Image (cartoon, rainbow, N blue to C red):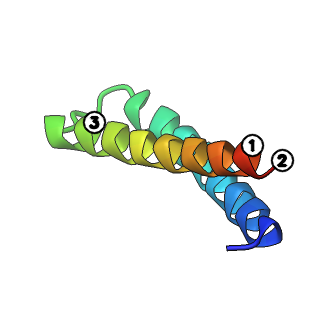
Amino acid sequence: MCDEDLRTRLKTLSEELKELEEEQSYVLKQTGLHLPGHTVRRYEAEVQTLKASIAEIIAELELRK
């Protein structure tokens, strides 16, 4: 991928992470709503996956400088 594509992908992943964290915060802070444990683990797994992808892209961009 060229640098431009990596930066575009980085921006997209960062936006997805922000949206997911906002959704997670909203859902998990609902009072009176019982959520199964797998819901919490799913959010955590998705956040970690996005963060790992973002870190990989940042590392690749740094190597190219």
From the viewer's side, name the closer residue of 21 and 30. 21
For residue 60, above or below residue 12: above
- Give the x, y percent position of residue 19: 61, 49
- Give the x, y percent position of residue 5: 75, 72
In this picture, residue 36 sits left or right of residue 32: left
In this picture, residue 33 sits left or right of residue 9: left
The amino acid type found where label 2 is placed reads: Lys
Indicate which label's residue lies in the foreground, 3 or 2.
2
The amino acid type found where label 1 is placed reads: Glu
From the viewer's side, name the closer residue of 19 and 53. 53
Q: Hey, which quadrant is residue 11 in on the image?
A: bottom right
The answer to the question of whether label 3 and label 2 lie on touching residues, with beta carbons closer than 8 A, is no
Give the mark nearer the N terminus: 1 vs 3.
3
Q: Residues within 10 Å of mark 3 (few under 14, many from 20)?
A: few
Q: Which residue is mark 3?
A: 40
Does dot 3 land on a helix, a strand or a loop?
helix
Q: Residues within 10 Å of mark 2 (few under 14, many from 20)?
A: few
Residue occupying the point 30% across, 28% down? 32
Does dot 2 land on a helix, a strand or a loop?
loop
- Give the x, y percent position of residue 53: 51, 50
Q: Which residue is mark 1?
A: 62
Does dot 1 land on a helix, a strand or a loop?
helix
Residue 65, numbered label: 2
